[in-house]
Image (tube, helix red, strand yellow):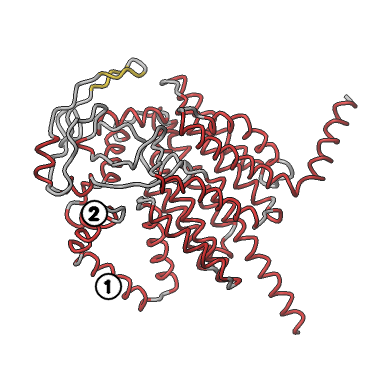
Amino acid sequence: MNGTLNSINYLKTLVDKHKSNLVNIFFWLFIILFFTDRVINYFIHFPFFVISAVIVLPFVYLFAQYQNPEKKQLRVLIFSFLTIAILNSIIYVFSTKNISDFLFISMFFIFYFFYKNNINYLKLSNIYLFLFLCLFIFSFTFFSINSQFYGKAEYSKSYNWDNYSEKKTEQSPPKKSGKDLNKKTKRVLPKKQLNYHNEKIERIESGQIDKKKYIRWEPNDLDAVELLRIYHNGLFRLPHIASYFFGFLFLFFAYQYQKKRKTIDIILLTISVVFCIYTGTRVVLAAFILAFITYLFRKKYFIYLVLLFTAMLLMVIANEYFLKLTENTFLYQYFTFIKTSTENFTRLSRFRLWYSWWLEVKDFDFLNFIIGKSFVNALIANSKYLDFKVWYHNDFINIFYTYGVWGAMLYIWFFIKIYRDNKIMIMQNTYIFIFFSSMLLTAIINGFYYYFPVFQLYLFFLMIKNEKQLVSMNNIQIADDK
């Protein structure tokens, strides 16, 4: 007994002694795991990050709970989601996808508390090294190396929903005529049965809703513009991950420049935002714009709002000109979004995904409502309705589907907690406000927890740390003046 107590006391002493280094050690451990995973998966498909994180994350959880005044909150979050994930794996189908989904949600929860309670130990130097590694991994795109999940490709094209299948046609889609595109690629998708937990799913041709509740979308000319999308991601698994990293790094360096007025920060924020745009993904920029509009409304800067909306109106009016100007470039998809949104909103992928979600949840029974149906069943549902195996690209509705109403309520509460914990700093600084708002908005329009929040949260809390130090210094200065 005494030996056990002595061992525990020794471990506590050891943790207290090295506490200032532990937070950065774990941050860098996850960076190493992430970038090692990217290199490995360029050659072979192997979930190195997920397997490694399953081993390491429990230790991070233990350290996050050490001297954590809110340990009950973190415990409820983790064990609620874990219990539901286990139940769903027993009731429905077990899949490694369920494990990875729970892993990424847990990572979001655990690192939030870990960074919050060790905020004074976060280091700015880590961000410069993180940016350098991101640039290195992304730089492969300039040598025509882009990994799409795994393997090699010059660039990836996003096939539209009507023309996607596991067996793509041999003919290459034309780039100009929407009518010709639909003539060349139109065919009936092969009927294929997928067996998941004794449930047989038959894939059929896409289109409008039929009697069996399949979504059937009639082809039209807008398919042509949404089809031709060029992405750049280097060794990043997805261009969206690179976009998230560079986008939030841009906000961080913009904050740094606001406070320190150093030229290096202008250079770094410029590099970050240029690469964010160059990835070709639209989510992060859309979140930033919406967050900025929210900020202007909150501050009642109506003149700036009028100017902004006028500029957006001009973009809509002159959209055809910009489409021709940017055709066959990565900027093209930014203007196709305007065209699709204004001319046929239902063609947007998010609309289809979320409608697919509605078709599923409106038939939920009581058990589904309470604990959901598991992450892999979300993939199955979209494979059934949209012939596209993908999750719902919205944290809140995906968690409701996967973990039920209790999981969704906990996730909503968690975002409310983030806001309440940091309300003063969020409300008094433009970039921290946009950063938090963008976290929430990306969670709604694409997803946040699945895009490695361990790194974004480090940026967020570094900004919070710096802001608190400035407030403290100002208070001391005021006291001295008195």
Image location (x, y in percent) of residue 11: 81, 36
Three-letter code, disc 1? Thr
Residues 434 and 78: in front is: 434
Q: Which residue is mark 1?
A: 310
Image location (x, y in percent) of residue 131: 55, 53
The residue lying furthest to the top in this view is: 198
| Residues under numbered marks 2 and 1 in contact, where contact means CB atoms less than 8 Å apart | no
Query: What residue sits 50% from the left and 57% below the top?
Result: 436
Query: What residue sits 31% from the left and 53% below the top?
Result: 330
How many neighbours does mark 1 have within 10 angstroms: few (below 14), some (14-19), or many (20 or more)? Answer: few
Image location (x, y in percent) of residue 433: 50, 63
Query: What residue sits 34% from the left and 41% below the top?
Result: 154
Query: What residue sits 67% from the left and 55% below the top?
Result: 123
Q: Quadrant of residue 355?
A: top left
Residues 475 and 192: in front is: 192
In this rendering, position of residue 41 left or right of residue 388 = right
Q: Secondary structure at mark 2?
A: helix
Q: Mark 2 and mark 1: span between their CA atoms?
A: 19 Å
> Residue 336 got which mark?
2
In this rendering, position of residue 72 left or right of residue 39 = right
Image location (x, y in percent) of residue 180: 9, 42
The residue lying furthest to the bottom in this view is: 482
Label 2 vs 1, first from the N-terminus:
1
Q: Quadrant of residue 308?
A: bottom left
Q: Is residue 430 above or below residue 90?
A: below
Q: Is residue 426 above or below residue 408?
A: below
